Every structure is written in C-alpha cells, then in structure tokens.
Amino acid sequence: MMLLSLILLPLLGAVLLALQPRLGAKGAGQFTMCWAVLALLLAGGLGCPVMSSREWSLPWIPDADIALRFSLDGISWLFLVLTGLVTLFAVVASLLNGKGDRAYFALILVLQSALFGVFTARHFIPWFLCWELTLIPAYLLIRLWGGTGAPKAALRFFIMTLGGSAFMLVGFLALQLAIGTMDFDALGKLAANHQLAGGLEKAFAFTGASGHTLLTCVALAVFLGLAVKLPVVPFHAWLPAAYAEAPTPVTMLLTGLLSKMGVYGLLRIFLPVFPEVLPSIAPLLSWLAVATVLLGAMAALAQTDLKRMLAYSSVNHLGYCALAIAAAAAVQTDRSALAAALSGTVLQAINHGVIASTLFFGIGILESRSRGQRGLNDFGGLRAQTPVFCGLFGIAVFASLGLPGLSGFVGEFLIFNGAFALTPAAAVVSVAGLLLTAVFLLRMIRQVFAGPLKPSLAKWQDLGTAERIVFGIAILLIAIPGIWPQLLLQFSNAGILELLDLLSPLP
C-alpha cells in the first residue's frame, strides 16, 4: 500500500487545496512545498532495502487480463525520486518568484501524481491513463500562466502529444486482440520467446501481411507516441514554444520530468516488448537520433532567446538517450556495450532532469530581476555584479556541456562508450553535437556574465539567502553523481541486467 499511497498523496494534496478557498497564493505555495517534501520523503523511503510493499495490483477487467498494477524496481525508483526533487524545486522557484495561486499549485500536484503513476505502472491501461492525465495539468499550466504566446504553444503541445498517444493506443490494442494481454511483463516474456509476431500474423491473417511486418508497424506506432514526448526530431515542434512561453517553474517540470516519460517508455516498454523487430528498424532510429542531436544543437546555436536556447539544448541532450536506444536496437549480442548504453541512458535522463531544471531556474532569476528580459544580448558583465550567481550558474552550464567530474559527463560517456561499439557511424556523427553544445553554452556565459557591466544592471543584487540555498542544493545534486556515479548505478543495475536478459539472453 505504500506505493499506492505515494501515487495518491499528491492528488490528496490537490483536493485539500481545493477545499481551502480562503488560502492565499503564498499560503497555497507553502502548503504545496510541505506536501512536495512529504512526497519526496515517501518516494525516497520506498528505495529502502527493508521496504517490502513495492507492488500493488487490483484486477479490473479479469476476462481481458486488465489490472491496475503498479510495481517498483531500482530504475523506477530513480525516476520517482527525480519527480519528487524537480517538483519540489519547481514549487520553491514559484514561491521565490511570487508565481501561482491555489489552482496553479493544485495542478502541479495533479501532474506529480500522474508522473508517479507513469513511472510505476506495469500494465498498459493504468500506464496510459496516467500518461494522458499529465496532459491536462501541463496544458493548463502553460495556457493559463504562460506568456503572450502561451495559448498557441499549449494547444500545439496538447494536440501533438495526444496525436502520438493515439498511435500508441492503436498499437497496444492490436497486441491485446492478438495476444490477449497488455501487461508489460507478460508481453516481455512472450517477446523473448518470439511469440508476438506469430500471434499478430494469426489474428490479422486477413491483411495478408507477415507477422514481422505487423509487429514492425505496432513497434513504430508505439515509438511515435514516445518520440513526441522525448522529443525526437521531427516530432519536437511543440517543445521550443512550450518551454519559452510557460512560466519558468513549469518549464522546469516540462524539461525535468515530462521529457523523461519518453526516455522511461523507451527503456521499460519499447525495448522489452519489441526485440523481434528492433534490428530491422534500428537504422531509422539511429538517424533520427543523430538528427535530434545535431539539429537540436544547431537550433540552440541560432537562438538569442535564452529559454529557447535551453529548450533546443534539451532536445540535443535527450537525443543522446535516443542514440543509446537506437544502438541497443541495432546490435543485441554485445552485452557489455549494451549495458554501457542502457546504464548511460538512465544516468543521462536523471542527471539531465536536475541540470536542465537548474539552468532554467537560473534563467528565471535573470528574467525576474530584469522584469522579463531574457535575450542573449540583454545582459553583460554580471560576473562582477553577481559573482555567486555567476559561479553557481556556471557550474550547471559546465555540467550540461559534459565537463568531467560533474554529472553530465558520466551519462554521455557511457552512452558513447556503448554506441561506438554498436553503431559506430551514428556515434561518430553525433560527436559533433558535443562540440556544438560547448559552443552555444560558452557563448551564453560570455554574453551574459563577461565583458563590461551594462549601466542598467549596476544596481542588481546577488543571490539572496533562499536562492543560494536552493542553488547550492542543486549544485550538490549535480556534483555528487559526477564524482560518485555508482550512487545511482547501484539502483539501476538490477533492472539493466533484466533488460539485457530480454534483449540478449545468455546462451
């Protein structure tokens, strides 16, 4: 029941907020912050080795083998803790910026509850319900509290994500009709025994298509739904406008958590369920990943709006996760390279969630102090005026460009270590993305913090006590995994080994 309690806890907090009409914006934010701390502590407690209640299941439609089933392993736990951390981070950022009211904070809690469900559901139906539930609060948070272009950006985000989900739903309904189950673990076992293609061929014999062709179509439909959320080029069109127009704390949620839904789905659903057809679609996946890495970096290099620059930077960095998935799909015989690529994907997702949220938090500080300005050329010389802010923000930037010793380096290193062995051509081309990332991030640091101080910035104050505490904690979360990556890997290793046994069973 502890797992169910974690999923429902944020919903309970949202209901309690709704029942307090006289609660002001500051009080609602403080209440949500306390509730987010409680959710983070409960999520962290579920990782305790002595905790036995890590699964909850309730039969829903037994005749169709549909159950509300949620379970927890090391990989899921890492994503739960990330959800707790980034949600708390976003709530604190909202309080510091004076952003939001009761409805705003209640929607954040609803979003957190749905995310907890996405990262623990082990049957497609509850997983899909939670997946779709994230759309509603995210859309409203962008639409109601965003900038002047928020209505259009929110609508594009909603339509593109919903469209991708429709393809994914059709794919799993086909599996349900052919196999009789949508349970992820059951499908993974059947896939390991090469039974899915045969089941689809028998069920859809009237099409005249082979089982391999049908399963490939299902796999591509599921990939499309996940690719929109990741996002993978060219399904990223919703992201730059949504990130730029959303309030900065909401952007932190979008980049830190919602994009990780796509990574998680590729790791925990796409790879285990479709190993039969992965080699045949691997070339397509590889070059989509390369396009995501390179085009994301080149688009970031062309931006002058700091939020849009970091938005495209997120596309670029998550492209490395797509590269690792494509590499794992291409060659399933080199277990050591597979293990490196998959472990790197988990680390990249978790560490990027913290790093990107910290960077957007820094942009939010610039935006609030300058009364809405966030252009690359709106600042200059801030290093002398705000040295603490410059130092802390600079550490987050160097983590993002993969400086050894910081968390961003470890995931990228493992991904390329695996990708060079599995898909060397795609890996070689993708290396250019690392160089372009360094160019636009260092240019941002130079334009904002170096050079002569602009007269309009002469009265700026450095970080306050609360901002220093929040930034300092974020930097610790960036530095510690960079020095001690095993801190995270020890939780994901068991899940990675299980995935390896599905993809590349030992003889």
Image (cartoon, helix red, strand yellow):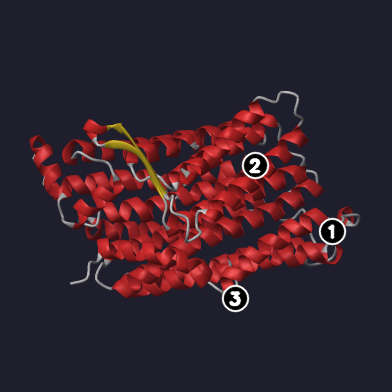
Q: Amino acid at mark 3?
A: Gly
Residue 359 marker: none
The answer to whether residue 195 shows anywhere in this view is yes
Mark 1 — residue?
Answer: 462
Name the residue at 65% across, 33% down: 104
Q: Is residue 218 left or right of residue 343?
A: left
Q: Quote the CA–CA distance across marks 3 and 1.
A: 26 Å
Across and down, in percent, residue 191 comes to 21, 53
Q: Nearer the viewer, residue 299 or 333?
A: 333
Is 210 located above or below residue 106 in the figure? below
Q: Earlier in the sequence, mark 3 or mark 1?
A: 3
Q: Is residue 271 left or right of residue 134?
A: left
Q: Name the element at disc 2.
A: helix
The answer to whether marks 3 and 1 mark residues whose Cβ atoms lie closer than 8 Å is no
Q: Amino acid at mark 2?
A: Trp
Across and down, in percent, residue 355 comes to 60, 60
Q: Quote the CA–CA distance across marks 2 and 3.
A: 33 Å
Mark 2 — residue?
Answer: 35
Crowding near the residue tagged with mark 1, few <14, some 14–19, many ≥20 C-alpha atoms within 10 Å: some
Assign the C terminus to one quadrant of the image. Answer: bottom left
Q: Earlier in the sequence, mark 1 or mark 2?
A: 2
Name the residue at 29% across, 61% down: 329
Name the residue at 8% across, 38% down: 205
Is 175 located above or below residue 408 in the figure? above
Mark 3 — residue?
Answer: 405
Across and down, in percent, residue 458 comes to 90, 57
